[in-house]
Amino acid sequence: MRFLNSFSEGAKIAYGALKTNKIRSTLTALCIIIGITMVTVVDSVTTGMDITFEKSMSMLGQNVVYVEKWPWGMGGEYKWWEYRNRKEMDLDYIEQIREYSEYATNVAASASRGVSVRYKEKSAESVGLNGATANYLEIQGLNIEDGRMFVDQEVRTGSNVAVIGNTLKESLFELEVPLGKQIRLGGKRFTVVGVLEKQGKFMGLEDTDNRIIIPISAYQNIYGLRSGLQIGVKFEDQQAMLEGEYELEGIMRRIRQLDAAEDNDFSLNKPEAFKEQLAGMKAGIYAVGFILSGLSLLIGGIGVMNIMFVSVRERTKEIGIRKAVGAKSWEILLQFLMEAIAICLLGGVIGVALAGGLTILINQAFVAVMNVGVVILGFSICTAVGVLFGFIPAYRAAKSDPIESLRFE
């Protein structure tokens, strides 16, 4: 019962000290605020990246391997001067892969670039254009929301038809129904035959709905296929993809007529490559964030210790009076320890509030999701810093001589 009374009394005294010295307490907690803000924001960004990752990977298709001239990523062995000299992909490879592969269930081709699209007086800039085969949606795992996808016949004849994403639909058509309307692209008129289901942003950055898909033959008529052709090969499941990847490598070497001693002059790219890049990016964010957070908390803890020594000295006579009327050493220790913890928790509250605002801002441009776990972690860190750096001043106060304390001026 005495412990509870002492705890309650210590909390009131700590609150009174903070209320009396608002500016000093806030300035003391400044580094704690910075540290907790950084810890929370770093976790929010990495949590957002994890949540977004799986959804973003589904935008690249499930169980798909892409055959391209260039590899994905910029790792330590990325030799662009060698990749630059490789031969481009060819549309004829599609039929050859279909013929030779036992594991592939679908093969499609696409090429892409950024374009401007116009409808009457309206225009959309930096639109992602895909010239693709008719089975492109099956490879990518995309669905049509309204209308239809163009068919093989339209690809063979190079028909000027287009399927658009939701962002492009909203930019150009607003309340109009886009189906059957004609848009201008690359100096040609294209008829809209379908609208894609909304997908969202890829890794929180690129708007995948700001896009347009046209037959690859129509794309070739306007821009040519001298570079950037990508061949997507889909497999039934993960196991088939593991087997099919080796088979696909052999087929491509056969198509390219490579000798046994020659290196591949093509790349087999998989969405899993982004997972490695994501892990590296997260590790970098964690390392920088937590090093800076650790330094801020260390400096903040030293500041708390320093101000607690000042507080103990200012209230030396109060300590003597409390001991003279029967206060135990552990009660004095608890009082000052709670004051140190209160200062740190004040920093934690402000830090978490700032982190919440920053998380909202970051989420507008990238991805960031704050979770309850990191908030609890933040307050736990504050408590630990308060106990660790407040203990020595509190212990000094608890062990002070009551007679000497009463004499102090």
Image: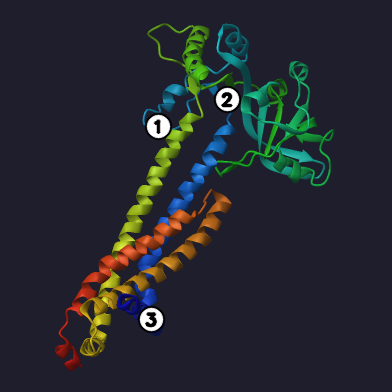
The answer to whether the residue labelled 1 contacts the one labelled 3, judged by CB atoms less than 8 Å apart, is no
- SS for tag 3? helix
Question: Regarding mark 2 in the picture, which secondary structure is present there?
Answer: loop
Specify the amino acid type for callout 3.
Lys
In percent of width and height, residue 173 lies at 80, 43
State left or right for residue 372 relative to residue 214: left
Badge 3 crowding class, 10 Å Cα cut-off, few under 14, some 14 to 19, many 20 or more, is some
For the residues labelled 1 and 3, the Cα–Cα distance comes to: 57 Å
First of labels 1, 2 by sequence position: 1
Residue 317 in the image: state x and y as whole percent. 23, 90
Q: Secondary structure at mark 1?
A: loop
Kindly identify the residue that appears in the image at 51 percent across and 60 percent down: 356
105 relative to 20, above or below: above
Mark 3 and mark 2 lie on one chain; the one further toward the N terminus is: 3
Q: Residue 29: give x, y in percent of width and height.
A: 37, 71
3 or 2: mark nearer the eye = 3
Residue receiving disc 1: 75
Residue 210, located in which quarter of the rendered image?
top right
Mark linked to residue 12:
3
Q: Residues within 10 Å of mark 1 (few under 14, many from 20)?
A: few
> Does 257 sit left or right of 78 as displayed?
right
Residue sitting at 37 percent across and 8 percent down?
A: 261
Which comes before the other along the chain, label 1 or label 3?
A: 3
Tag 1: amino acid? Gly
* Residue picked out by circle 2: 228
Relative image position of residue 199 (x, y in whole percent)? 65, 39
Q: Is residue 196 above or below residue 17?
A: above
Q: Marks 1/2: CA distance?
A: 20 Å
Q: Is residue 307 visible?
A: no
